[in-house]
Image: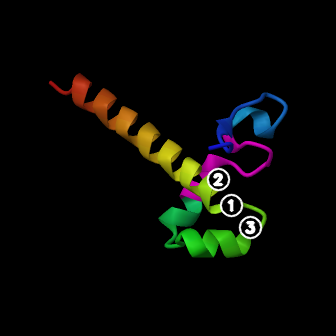
Amino acid sequence: MKSSIVSKKTVLGGKPVIAGTRISVDLIATYLATGYDLSDIRQAYPHLTKDQIEVALTYIHDAASRQIKKLEATRV
């Protein structure tokens, strides 16, 4: 899969973005949190491919999983 997530200091202050765009993973997460689905996101950003959005969704899932594991490890 050619699309990926990148972070560069010169693009949105280093926030993770979909490669080749200025669309942050946080923006995709916000859309999901407010009830949008994949087709809604594609309609809002027609230049994004399904694969690019799915990579962002995987990134979001993986980041959340890492946070949960950290929290579980610090429980007393």
Q: Are marks 2 and 1 in contact (CB under 8 Å)?
A: yes
Check if residue 64 falls in the magenta segment.
Answer: no
Q: How is this picture coloured?
A: rainbow
Q: Nearer the viewer, mark 3 or mark 1?
A: 1
Rendered location of residue 74, percent (x, y): 25, 23
Q: Secondary structure at mark 3?
A: loop
Examine the structure image and report whether residue 23 is included in the region drawn in magenta.
yes
Identify residue type, mark 2.
Gln
The amino acid type, in three-letter code, at marker 1 is Thr
Q: Is residue 31 left or right of residue 63?
A: right
State the CA–CA distance, disc 3 to disc 2: 11 Å
Farthest residue in the left direction? 76
Disc 2 target residue: 52
Which residue is located at x 68 percent, y 48 percent?
24
Which label sits in the foreground, 3 or 2? 2
Circle 3 is placed at which residue position?
45
Q: Which residue is mark 1?
A: 49
Determine the CA span between mark 2 and mark 1.
5 Å
Name the residue nearer the viewer: 5 or 34: 5
In this rendered view, identify the residue nearer to me: 71 or 47. Answer: 47
